[in-house]
Image (cartoon, helix red, strand yellow):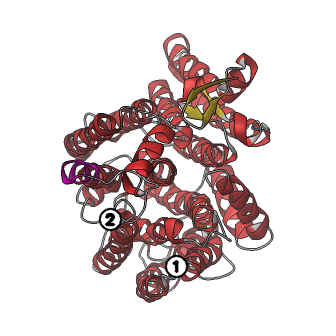
Amino acid sequence: MDSVLTNVVVNSDPGVNLLAMVPALLLTGLAMAAGLLEVFWPASRRRDIGFIAGVSLLGIALLTAIIQPPPFDQQLVLGGMYRFDALSQFFSVVALVAAGIVCLLTLDVPQLGKMGEFYAILIVATLGACLMAGASDLIMAFLALETLSISLYVLTGFLVRDGRSSESGMKYFLFGAFMSAILLYGFSLLYGFTGSTNFYAIGARLADIFSGRQAPALETLLPVLLALVMVIAGFGFKISAVPFHFWTPDVYEGAPTSVTAFVSVASKAASFALMMRLALIAFQGDDPTRFWVQLFAILAVVSMTVGNLFALVQGNLKRLLAYSSIAQAGYTLIGVAAVAAQPSSQPGLGVAAVAFYMAMYTLTNLAAFGVVIVYSNVTGAEKISDFAGLSRRNLGLALVMTVALLSLAGVPPAAGFFGKFFLFRAAVDANLTWLAVAGVLNSMIALYYYLIVIKVMFVDRSETENQPAPVGNAAVWALGIATIGVILLGTFFATPIFDWAVQAAQGLF
C-alpha cells in the first residue's frame, strides 16, 4: 500500500488490482471471441454469437455483483485511476445487464442478428461504461467515455445501406465529437489549475482554494467555474439534458432500435455515475464551486418540462421515447442536485436515489424498446398509430409495454413509482422541495402521453389486428427479465436494492 496522493491511499496489491479488473478483462476476452467467431463460423451459425454474448454478459453481471470490494481505505486501484467500490460495482451491473438484454433482443433483428461484429462493438461499449462507473482520474474518465462514445457512433450508423441509420450515425458523431472537445477542454483547465488529474487531488486543491485557507484570485476562480460549466455541458450531452438534447430525437429514431435501446440506458447510467463521482470528489469546495447544485436543479426542471411537452405531440413511438428519455434525465438530475445539499446526517441518499432510478429506468426502457424491436420485426412499423390493436395481436407484448409505460410514468406497483419517490424524497430532505414539486407536476403531464399509447394498444382498432405478432424465444426471455425486474423493483426488492445503493453511495462521503 503506497500513499501517492494527498490524504489518499492507493492499493498496490496485485491481487486486488486484478480482482477490480475482472469484469473488464472478461469483457475484452468476450469482444475478441465475438470477432473471431464472426470470422471462422459459417453464416448459418452466426446467430449463436448473439446468444453467447447475451448469456455471457448476464453471467459477468452476476459475477460482478458477487465480487466483494476491499475495505474503504483500500479501494483506489490502478495507481489511483479507478475506484473499486460498491458504487462502481452497482453501475457496472446495470450496464452489463442492459447489454445482455439488448443482445438477446437483437437475435431475430434482420441485418443485425447474425452480425458478430455488432455484438463485439456492443461489448466494447459496455467495457467503456463499466470503466466510467469507477473512474477516479480525468485520463481514465475520458478514455472510458470515448471508448463508450466511439462504439456508440459506430453502432448508430451500423446499417450503412439505411439512409436513416447513416444520417443518425453522422449526426451523433459530429455533435458528440464537438461536446467531447468541450469536456476535454474543461478537464484540461482542471489539470492546469490543480496540477493533477486525480479526482481526490483535484478536490483537495479546490478545497484549499475555496475554503478560506487560500483566497481565490479572480484569475483562478473564473477558469475553475468555466471548467465546471464545460464539464456539465459535456455530461449534459451524454445524458440528453436540455439544452444539449438536440441530437436525441433524430438519433433515437434513425438508429437501429437495438442500438437506441442501449444508448438510452447504458450510456445514461454510466454518465450519471461518472458525473456524480466527479462532482462529489473533485468539486467539493464551498459555495463558489457548489453552484453546480443550482445549475443541476435548473437543468432538471428545463429537461423535464421540455421533454414532456414535446413528447405530447409525437406520432412516432421512438421519438416519443426519445423525448421521454430527455424528461427522465431531468428527473434523475433532481437526485444529482440533491446530492451536495444533502444533510450530513443522511449521506448518500441523493446518490442512492440516482443509482436506484438508473437501475429501474434501464429495465423499464429496455422493456419498452424491446416491444418496439419485436413488433417492428413483424410489421416494420414505428408509429404510435401502427400499434393499434396490439393487445389482440399479442397480449403479452401489449402488457409488457403497459408495464414499461406505467413505470416511466411512476404508477405503482411498477418500479418507476419508487424510483420517483426516492428522488423526490432526496430533494425534500435537501431543502429542494420546489424541485420535487416540479417533478410531481411533470409526472402528471407525462402520464397523459403514456396513457395515449396504452389506449391505442387496447382500444383502437386496426385492419390487421387479427394477424398474430409472433415473438422469438430469446426475445421472450429478454422481455421477461426486464418486465419481471420492473415489477420486483416496484414491490419486494425496492427496499433491499435501495439499501444496497445507499451503502454503495456512502463510500463517496
Of residues 132 and 328, the one nearer the viewer is 132
For residue 168, side relative to residue 307 (left or right): left
Q: Residue at x 46, y 59 (%)?
A: 372
* Residue 54 is one of the magenta-drawn residues: no
Residues in magenta?
A: 217-224
Expressed as whole percent of the image width and height from the top left, the position of residue 273 reads 52, 50
Q: Residue at x 45, y 31 (%)?
A: 140
Q: Amino acid at mark 2?
A: Arg
Give the number of the disc on residue 163. Answer: none
Single out the mark in the foreground, 1 or 2: 1
Q: Which residue, given by chain and number where applicable, does mark 1 sit on?
A: 409
The image quadrant that residue 495 belongs to is bottom right
Q: Secondary structure at mark 1?
A: helix
Q: Residue at x 27, y 79 (%)?
A: 313
Q: State how many labels appear.
A: 2
Q: Earlier in the sequence, mark 1 or mark 2?
A: 2
Residue 101 visible within the image: yes
Type of secondary structure dominating the magenta stretch: helix
Q: Secondary structure at mark 2?
A: helix
Q: With respect to residue 387, does 508 lie above or below?
A: above
Residue at the far top in the pictured view:
40
Q: Residue at x 74, y 69 (%)?
A: 494
Expressed as whole percent of the image width and height from the top left, the position of residue 58 reads 69, 40
Q: With respect to residue 57, does 465 lie above or below?
A: below
Quick one: quadrant of the N terminus? top right
For residue 321, side relative to residue 350 (left or right): left
For residue 213, side relative to residue 250 (left or right): right
Q: Which residue, given by chain and number where applicable, does mark 2 sit on?
A: 319
Distance CA(mark 1)–CA(mark 2): 17 Å
Quick one: quadrant of the C terminus? bottom right
Q: Amino acid at mark 1?
A: Ala
The image quadrant that residue 485 belongs to is bottom right
